[in-house]
Amino acid sequence: MATENKSKITVTSPLLPSLEEFNGMLSQIWDSKWITNNGSFHRQLEKELCEYLKVPYISLFTNGTLPLITSLQALRVTGEVITTPYSFVATTHSLWWNGIKPVFVDVDAKTGNLDPDRIEAAITPKTTAIMPVHVYGTPCDTERIQEIADKYGLKVIYDAAHAFGVEVNGKSVLNAGDVSTLSFHATKVYNTIEGGALVMHDEETKRRIDYLKNFGFASETEVVAPGINSKMDEIRSAYGLLNLRQVDSAIEARRKAAKTYREALRGTEGLTFFDDINGVRHNYSYFPIFIDAEKYGSSRDEVYEKMKEQNVMGRRYFYPLISEFTTYRGLSSASRENLPNAHRIAQSVICLPMHHALTESDLERVINILRK
Ligand SMILES: *Cc1c(COP(=O)(O)O)cnc(C)c1O
């Protein structure tokens, strides 16, 4: 089929600060000659993020994977950790890097999030923590997960890479569990090019994390732990300060795009999507649709290829499941029988183009491919 030379509609597009304003901040950095190591923009971004996100403490990182790895160190998590196969590989990789055995538990078919009803059956004497993911920014059932964690004395580390700014009844979802991690990668709702953060509830944990992300240095001459280097530099902190000023309007543009998709696609046989949840402030980080091949008349992959032919880039996010990758597929918890919902979702999902810069005509092109 001809592509009709239509311009490419990408699945995401980075939110970029004004180049002029960024240049102004670069001049300040050049003047100060302080380019990394807890500089003033780094400190300011931590402060402003705490306010924006409504969280007590935050520690900036150089990407969204290192806060996962570092928090497991900080909380001294060992043995086995219960986690979800329906996520980006970094979630499970962070366990592997700490010598921890991932134990996959199936997800809730309605949300794609770890199913609390299946957690207890997977707990063994070696289990020390639960690592859930707020997939697509949809909040996990944090109360149920905390109840289970308290009952068995487990830590809870949320991979909240998708949940920037997500609130439930006016409270940040990032305050759930022991810690939450964020990714500020270029593809996310809020980006610092590469970047990330760890959200914690107390000053002691913040201090310990700040040591760990700086080789374990507690002072000029004291190293208190085998830390790593995962500090965010001044240039990306400055970029992040500028992007924070426009992230609300970006989320609003995403909300409108989601509304357009929903209005146009609702009722399409064999095609489903999520609706907003009452009391939740969503960030519209992704717009996943789920194709039931039998009812829709074509398979997910056929739809995905058809979009591609029309220069519309969807993304099969998350497919394959993490439990299908060579590193993990030998684990007994990685079996298909253990993860039926995750498999079903992974086989049917396409994330549609979703970002702040989509135009009405972009949305129309996507919708016309999908609607019948
Ligand atoms: C993006 C992402 C990460 C990793 O973040 P990076 O900043 O790319 O290292 C981790 N978990 C999930 C669920 C993600 O989507």
Image: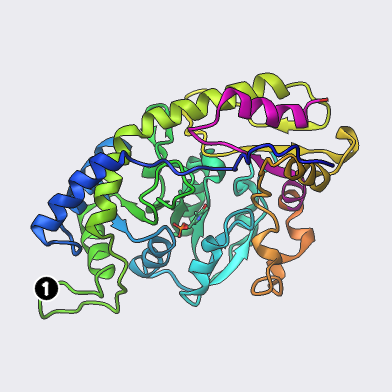
Q: Residue furthest top?
A: 263
Task: Tell me the residue at 64%/74% (across/down).
Answer: 327
Above-or-below relation of 160 to 217: above
Residue 106 place in picture, x, y as percent: 67, 53
Task: Tell me the residue at 62%/29% (across/down).
Answer: 362
Instruction: Provide the secondary structure element on which disc 1 rests.
Output: loop
Residue 152: in magenta span: no
Q: What span is in magenta?
A: 343-371
Q: Residue furthest front?
A: 5
Above-or-below relation of 209 to 51: below
User: Horizontally, is 12 left or right of 211 in the view?
Assistant: right
Residue 354: in magenta span: yes
Count of marks overlaid on the render:
1
Quadrant of residue 10 within the rendered picture: top right
Residue 334 visible in the snapshot: yes
Task: Tell me the residue at 68%/49% (across/down).
Answer: 316
Above-or-below relation of 78 to 174: below
The residue lying toward the viewer, choosing from 361 and 243, is 361
| Residue matched to label 1 | 219
Residue 17 place in picture, x, y as percent: 33, 40
Q: Quadrant of the N terminus?
A: top right
Q: Ligand 1: does it lie within 8 Å of the C-beta at label 1?
A: no
Above-or-below relation of 76 to 32: below
The three-letter code of the residue at mark 1 reads Ser
